[in-house]
Image (cartoon, coloured by chain):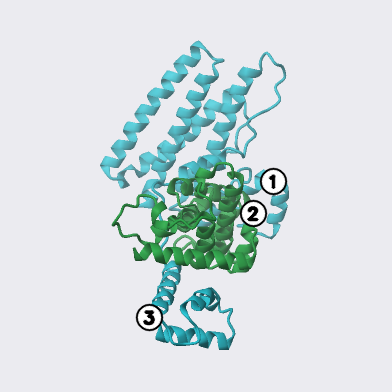
Amino acid sequence: MTMHAMDCAAFDERLADYLEGDLDFAARREVEAHVASCARCAALLRDVEHIRVSAAELPELTPSTDLWGGIARRIDTPVLPLTRPTPNVVAGRRNFDWVRRAAIAAALVAVTAGVTYTLTVAHGPRAAQTIASTSPASNGPSSTDTAQREDMAATPRMPESPLANPRDTEPLISPNPPLTNASAADTYSREIDRLRTIFARNRSQLDPRTAAIIEANLKVIDEAIAQSKAALAQDPASRFLNNQLNSALGKKLELLHTAALLPNRT
Amino acid sequence: MTVATVDNPTFTTSRSDADDVALAASGDRLAFERVYRTHVNRVFAVCARMVADRSVAEELTQDVFVRAWSKLSLYRGESAFTTWLHRLTVNVVLNARKSEGRNRSRFGSEPDEVDTLPHARASGWMPGMALDLDAAIAGLPPGARQVFVLHDVEGYKHEEIAEMLGITAGGSKAQLHRARLLLREALNR
C-alpha cells in the first residue's frame, strides 16, 4: 500500500504515540510522510482525530427526572440522631416512635424554616442579609462533623444578622423546639401553617391549573393525615401508624415547600 | 472566590455560583439547591458516560451531591468549584465501582480484556441504526470507556487517570488508543 519506509503496520504501531506526542521529531516526520501518501492511514488518523475532537465537545446530559427531592431527603436524614437511649426497655418502642417522629419533624422544619423565612422576606430591602442569615447552623454540612466545622474557619461566611421580618414584628423562625412527644405534631403544624400562608399569598402568581393541582394533592394528603391520626388514637404505640403519619406530614411539608418556591422559579 | 456580602448591592439580583457555593458551605440549603441546579447536568453527564447506564448514573449523581453537601465545608476555593465537584464526581463513580465490584451488572459484566465491538453491546442498538458518539462510548468495554471518558471527554491527563484508576500511565494510553479504534469501528459501520 505504501512505497515509503514506513508501512501501514508500522504506522498502526506508532499511531498511539503519535497522537500522544510521544514521538521524536524524526519519527513524527516519518509518520506524517506515510500519512501523506497512504489513503488508508490518512483516513484512520483523520477519524481518530475527529473522535478526539468530538468527544471534547460532547454536550452535558440531563437526568430523566429532577433528582433534588431524593438528594434533599438524604441530606436531611443523617443530620439529626434518630436513635436515643431509652430509659427502659418496656417503653422503648413507644419512645422510639415519638423520638423518631420528633427528629424527622425537626429536620423537616429546619429545612423548610429557611425557605419560609427567605420567601417571606424575599421582597424586603435587606433580602441579601436575611438570606445569608438563614443558614441553619445545626443543619449544615459542617454540623455532622466537628472537625469539618473547624476546617470551615477558613471558608468565607456570611455575617450573622438578626432574624427580623421587615413586615412583622414577630420573628418568623423560632429556634427549633425541644424534641418532646407533644411538640412534634405542633412543630409540624406550625411550619405547615407558615408555608400555607406563603402559598396562599403567592397563589395569584401561579397558573390556576397548577394551584388547583397543588390544592387537590394537599387535600389527599390531609385525608391521609386525618386517617392516620384517627388510627393512632386507637393504637398510639403502632410504629406503622406513626410512620404513616410521619410520611404524610413529610409529604405535606415537601409539597408546600415546592409550592412556596414555585413563583420564585417562574 | 467571590464572597457575597450584605453590602453587595448586586447580591439579590445577580447572585453568582460562587456566592451560592459559599452560602451552601455554611449550611444554606436553598443555596445548595441552586448549586445543584447549576451543576447537575454536568455531573450527570460524567456519571452517565462513565457507567453507561442512565439509571445508575442518576443514583450516582445523587450520591455526588449528597457527598458534596457533606464535604463542602472543606472546599477552600483553591481550585474552581467546577473542578472540585468534577473530581468528586469521578471519585464517587470510581469508588462505587470498587464497592460494587461483585455486582458486575452495575458497570457491565463483560470481561474488559475482550475487544468486543462497541456496537454489539450498545444499549438499544439495532442493525442498521446509526450510532452517535455517546451510544458508541456506552458500548465500549468498561476499562476503555472510563479512560476514554476521563481523557478525551473530561480532559484528564494520563498520569491523573493512572492515579485514579490504579493503573500505569502507559496502561491508560493503551486503553485510550484501544477505545478510539473501537469507537471508529463502531461509528463507521
Q: Are marks 1 and 3 in contact (CB under 8 Å)?
A: no
Percent coordinates x, y for residue B93 in the rendering: 56, 52
Helix, strand or loop for disc 1: loop
* Residue B26 percent location from the top left of the image: 61, 53
Q: Which hue is chain A drawn in?
A: cyan
Nearest the eye: A258 or B91: B91
Q: CA distance from mark 3 to mark 2?
A: 56 Å
Q: Can residue B2 be seen at all in this image of the molecule?
A: no
The chain carrying label 3 is: A
- The residue identified by callout 2 is B73
Q: Local crowd at mark 2 within 10 Å, few (<14), some, or many (≥20)?
A: many
Circles 1 and 3 on the same chain: yes
Q: Give the chain coloured green.
A: B
Task: Judge from the rendering whether residue A71 lies leftward or rightward of residue B71; answer left or right.
Answer: left
- Occupied quadrant, residue B91: bottom right
Which chain is home to disc 1?
A
User: What residue is pinned by disc 3?
Assistant: A39
Q: CA distance from mark 1 to mark 3?
A: 62 Å
Mark 1, residue position: A145
Residue A6 tag number: none
Q: Are marks 1 and 2 in contact (CB under 8 Å)?
A: yes
Report the amino acid beneath label 1: Asp
Q: Image quadrant of residue A104? A: top right
Measuring 38% from the left and 23% from the top, which residue is drawn there?
A: A223
Tell which circle, 1 or 3, labels the residue nearer the N-terminal end: 3
Q: Name the residue located 68 percent from the left edge and 13 percent from the top edge.
A: A90
Label 1 neighbour load within 10 Å: few <14, some 14-19, many 20+:
some
Work out how far the residue at label 1 is from the one at label 2, CA to CA, in angstroms.
10 Å
Give how far across and how far down residue A139 sits, in percent: 60, 43
Residue depth check, mark 1 versus mark 3: number of the one nearer the observer:
3
A235 to B188, vertically: above or below: above
Task: Please provide percent x and percent y for residue B128.
Answer: 28, 57
